[in-house]
Image (cartoon, coloured by chain):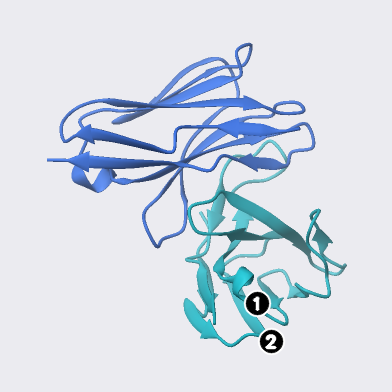
Amino acid sequence: SAVISQKPSRDICQRGTSLTIQCQVDSQVTMMFWYRQQPGQSLTLIATANQGSEATYESGFVIDKFPISRPNLTFSTLTVSNMSPEDSSIYLCSVPGGWGQESGELFFGEGSRLTVL
Amino acid sequence: GQNIDQPTEMTATEGAIVQINCTYQTSGFNGLFWYQQHAGEAPTFLSYNVLDGLEEKGRFSSFLSRSKGYSYLLLKELQMKDSASYLCAVKDSNYQLIWGAGTKLIIKP
């Protein structure tokens, strides 16, 4: 299993500002995923952070709004830019638990709960 | 489109058994997962089914029927700590995870 640390755990932000969320994993992983979970809703994949290349964004998410860095195999950041109240959500970092595409579970960080006023 | 359906909320009594259903319509299938998520916490892995049948793990069991696009999570001997949301997720033909909205399970004494 992987141990994933995320910070901040929660923050209250002003409209129009940006916040960077950090994700640290205790082992080297090829892929790291960033999810958003809005209140009472399902997990939505924002992007896959790949080391050494640009992140791959899902439909509806763009790099200008959610820039991602992946400087090495154990660390990634997600920035939520020019925030609005609609960005109030829990942001989760996750990594796959095994090798290859046949592997099973994802391991999640504790999540970062953002409230935008 | 791709869709995962599960009940929004269920209530059960401590010590009883509860079954949480999940139906899915996805482009391809490469496994189904159940996760538990306590309020304010991250999801944690419970089970993985890729073949038809029942997988038992202690008090929790998960069943899959690929022909019916159906799974259920069975929780036995319910405890108050089982109060949580239970998320069903399917890995599609591109190995992308499609998530259900989750079932909030409320356990009453």
Label 2 element class: loop
Query: Which residue occupies the foreground of this view, A10 or A108?
Result: A10
Find residue A77 and report its horizontal and vertical position in percent.
68, 76
B75 vs A40, left or right, is left
Q: Residues within 10 Å of mark 1 (few under 14, many from 20)?
A: some
Colour used to depict chain B in the structure image: blue
Find residue B30 and report its horizontal and vertical position in percent.
69, 29
Q: Is residue A46 above or below residue B68?
A: below
Parent chain of label 1: A
Which disc number belongs to residue A112? none
Q: Residue at x 75, y 59 (%)?
A: A48
The lab-note entry on whether marks 1 and 2 share a chain reads yes
**Residue carrying label 2:** A16
Instruction: Pick the quarter of the image with the C terminus of chain B.
Output: top left
Shown in cyan, the chain is A
Q: Taking the image as drawn, is residue A2 in sight?
A: yes
Find out whether the residues at labels 1 and 2 contact each other: C-beta distance under 8 Å: yes
Q: Earlier in the sequence, mark 1 or mark 2?
A: 2
**Residue carrying label 1:** A84
Find residue B13 and report its horizontal and vertical position in percent.
18, 33
Q: Residue at x 51, y 54 (%)?
A: A1
Label 1 element class: loop
Q: Amino acid at mark 2?
A: Gly
Q: Residues within 10 Å of mark 2 (few under 14, many from 20)?
A: few
A10 vs B9, left or right, is right
B90 vs A3, left or right, is right
Q: Amino acid at mark 1?
A: Ser
Q: Taking the image as drawn, is residue B57 in sight?
A: no
Find residue B93 and report its horizontal and vertical position in percent.
78, 31
